[in-house]
Amino acid sequence: MSLSPENPGTAQIAKPDLNRRTVLKRASALGLLAVPAVGLLEACATSGGSTPSDQSTGGAKSSDNPLGVDPAAGVEVVIFAGGYGDAYATKYHVPLYQKAFPKAKVTESSTQDIQGTLQPRFSGGNPPDVVDNSGTKFMDFGALIQDNQLQDLTDLLNAPSVDDASKTVKDTLVDGTVEVGTYSGKPYVMNYVFTVYGIWYNAKLFQTKGWTVPTTWADFKTLLDKIHAAGITPYGYAGANASYYQYYVLMTSAAKIGGADILKNIDNLEDGAWMDPAVKQSAAAWAEIGAKYSDKAFLGLKHTDVQLKQDQDQVAFYPSGNWLENEQKDSTPPTFNYAMMPVPSVTTSDKLDASSVMAVAGEPFIVAAKGKNPKGGMEYLRRMLSKEGAKDFTTATGSLTSVAHASDGMSLSPGLTSSSDALSKAKSAFYFRFDGWYKDLDTECRAATNELFYQGGTADHFCQRMQAKADAIKKDKSITKFTR
Amino acid sequence: MRHGKYPFVIGFLVVPVLLYAVFVISPYVQAFYYAFTDWHGIAAHPKLVGFANFTKLFHDSVFWKAAEHNIMLLLALPLITIAIALFLAFMLNVGGGSRGGTRSGVWGSKFYRVVFFLPQVLSLAIIAVLFQEILRPDNSGAINSIVHALGFSNIGFLTNPTLSMWTIIGVLVWQAVGFYVVLFSAGMSSIPGDIYEAAEMDGASRIVLFFRVTLPLLFDTIQVAWVYLGIAAFDAFALVNILTVDNGGPDGATTVLANEIYRDAFVYSRFGYASAMGVVLFFLTLTFAVLTLRLSRRESIEY
């Protein structure tokens, strides 16, 4: 999913389909057999019941157990082992639950292919209780919700928090966390990691060169000129697999120019949302950066390639979320300190302040409604969302959680300090969700961004093709729609 | 002996047939069923939607673009591969002239045979990863570092939309040629040497030998090669998915049907729609194979 970092070093390799040749020989016979046999095989890949017979009914409620979990019932957790790994679960979160319920057996496993591993279990009526439904191969939320597979997390949000019984879990979360996990009015998803997006640079390099962080577009371009003169590619992103990093800043600029409602309208598939002058202005501004200050060869490179170039000071600015520093920690030389700046204001009359940033809770955790122990699943999340759980996560992954003030007093790495500073100084924060809601629109926006930035596209064309795709999705009745 | 024959044969067949039925035939049959549903990959009982997926497919520009690329592959891949493979096989087996009555290949032909076959040993996924580095668009690409050193501007093998599809064809040809060299070599070695001898005595040059003797006598083998390559042209999934920019890009410039099936099923979770596309691909491949075998049928020459 776009909200989480790409896996370092893993290409999205799919298994080649090798069997068609052998099938061909029998194909003509099969063609005749196929139709009558369909009825018989109807339930094959979709077999399985809908109501679990062995679901835990729960135990007595108490102040330590506000959700009424059966203390002896096991909990199964599956973690997406991407940029964050799964050590935060095995080393910290599982023991947290285990300590509270010593009789319960908590099993944890991890995978890089959530969909391939778990989709059959969901459709077979045997899902794990807690899933970190993340990575490129996450399970479609719309499809899960349509089939009533997700536990409504309202009880969890209204339960008292682990640290302070007078506050509910909901009260302890950063603003907007519940909202991004809400689908059709119900909180189904708990996004655990808080991500701040911006443009990253090497603070040490900038210091030695005497370059200062720009806040206006004119200053930004002057600086890009200086960087160019110093023989460094001023700006770039990886077109081969991470062009959405760039459309995150493009959308940020649009929101700054025209206000955060621009993004809301786009998410809600409002008519003409992409044709708004603010989107067009932002696209035009970034098209110019692409044409003048980047390297067209980056269109064919992967995120790891371009990020490595930045670590070697061959690229000055790179758009990304605040997982970047942690992802690159093995290839960052001592002369490199990550720092993040908010996207500079495109016009002098921007609606939002230059300090505003895009920030959103990501890394979506879900509890299976048809699992063996949904209450235990929610309790696991409650423990995760305690101050201790959140701190442990930050220690293990170098990333912030959506638990407010959990990292206060912790010593953070330079990049994380810089991005959390940017967030606390920001006059406003905003986000969009269309990329997770409508994967087609995400695919289209990736291609359109590459065209705009690296292939000499125009802002008008960018807006037109995005609008056309959004209109097509709006018209398509088979696609589940969301609003916010 | 005779009366124990059937249990013996059945004993051998039952396991492979069962495995084949469960893991190959049954998914195929199920795909036909899912093509008529709106299945998103999770629900236990998907809704039947009739031909809706197929009508949508018909109006889907991405589908047509992918189909166009498959047809381009279908025309170019067999033609180029067979032409190169025939030439190389001829040079390796016949092109060296005759020595003591037997035809032989050019000097070092045994070595070349191994070299040409080598790509066939590697899986397509590995080839795709290798070519990613060979074709890298920046100065650290194997080809572009040379291009750059010579003072030319870098070539966007995969980033230039007008070039990228030809790059895919080039890699596919490179990978496939070795196998067909071996296939044609086997065919050529079964052509009796006295036919060549007789033709040479009549004053035929190497070119005439090739077109008047080798080609007609090799026709059956070429026909098989054509069907195999045609089927490969309907696939090309692994290479496109791994090698190209943005899985089939830039901007869909290299996408093929199999790649779109994968995207629809595993990115968009539209398994029903993807199945419908799979069914169309199934019939396309089938039609191609039947047509090729029918249209190219002719009297084979006995020798």
Image (cartoon, helix red, strand yellow):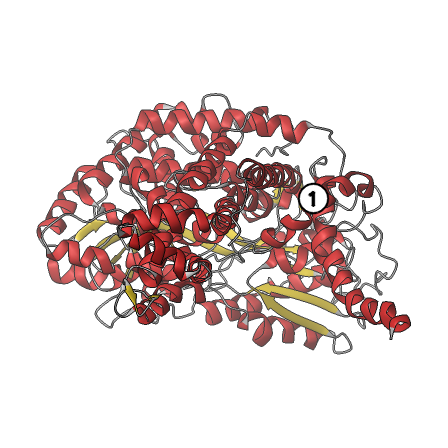
Q: Is residue B42 visible?
A: no
Which image quarter is the N terminus of chain B in? bottom right
Q: Would residue B208 appear left or right of A28 to someone viewing this image?
A: left
Q: Position of residue A47 (x, y in %)?
A: 80, 51
Q: Position of residue A168 (x, y in %)?
A: 65, 55
Given residues A279 and A408, the one toward you in this image is A279
Snapshot quadrant of residue A98 = bottom right
Given residues A249 and A116, the one toward you in this image is A116
Q: Secondary structure at mark 1?
A: helix
Q: Position of residue B282 (x, y in %)?
A: 62, 41
Q: Position of residue A129 (x, y in %)?
A: 72, 61
Residue named by callout 1: B31
Q: Is residue B224 above or below residue A85?
A: above
Q: Which residue is found at the position 32% from the left and 66% from the top?
A: B104
Q: Which residue is found at the position 24% from the left and 73% from the top?
A: A334
Q: Would residue A149 appear left or right of B146 to someone viewing this image?
A: right
Q: Is residue B291 above or below residue A412?
A: above
